[in-house]
Amino acid sequence: MPVETKYFEINTEGNCDVLDITDYISDALDESEISNGTITVFVPGSTAGVTTIEYESGAVRDLKEVFSRLVPENEYYAHNARWGDGNGHSHIRASILGPSLSIPFSSSRLILGTWQQVILVDFDNRQRKREIILQIIGE
């Protein structure tokens, strides 16, 4: 079964920045020789994650607020005590969300719901340039 690996980079603002990356993924499928299969989206690092959501301002705000309530920024984190970088909450939030997502595709088109987009959430406490790895498997 053929496998293709592609990469793209995206700049983030950090601090729970939510970015719609659906078009980047769709563009990679358009350029691929594989037309049916599964694409895995993966963000290296331990302070960002990927998932799907209806990418509209209310849902994005709700998502940010939930992470803020679940894993508050200003709590004590042993990671901060050890490294002094103040992003202990970022690591915990990212581990809850997860670094990867697999999506089926057919005829070089993602199989997503009508209101479903793929998002990157950067939880780090600073701006970043994130590399996203796409691994396309199929026929």
Image (tube, rainbow, N blue to C red):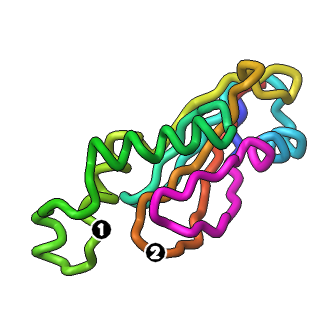
Given the image, on which type of amino acid does mark 2 rest? Arg
Q: Which residue is mark 2?
A: 126
Q: Is residue 66 above or below residue 6?
A: above
Residue drawn at point x = 58 percent, y = 42 percent: 60
Residue 89: where, in percent of width, then height? 27, 58
Residue at the location (61% across, 44% down)? 119
Residue at 88% x, 22% y is 107
Provide residue 23's location: percent of width, then percent of height. 80, 45
Instruction: Work out whether mark 1 precedes mark 2 in sequence or the reverse, and give the earlier one.
Output: 1
Is 12 left, or right, of 66 in this rendering? Answer: right
Tell me if residue 104 can be seen. yes
Does 96 sit above or below residue 7?
A: above
Report whether 60 appears left or right of 88.
Answer: right
Would residue 137 be visible to someone looking at this image? no
Q: Which residues are magenta?
A: 6-25
Asked if disc 1 and disc 2 are in contact, CB closer than 8 Å, the reply is yes
Near-viewer residue (126 or 72): 72
Q: Position of residue 98 (x, y in %)?
A: 41, 41
The CA distance from mark 1 to mark 2 is 9 Å
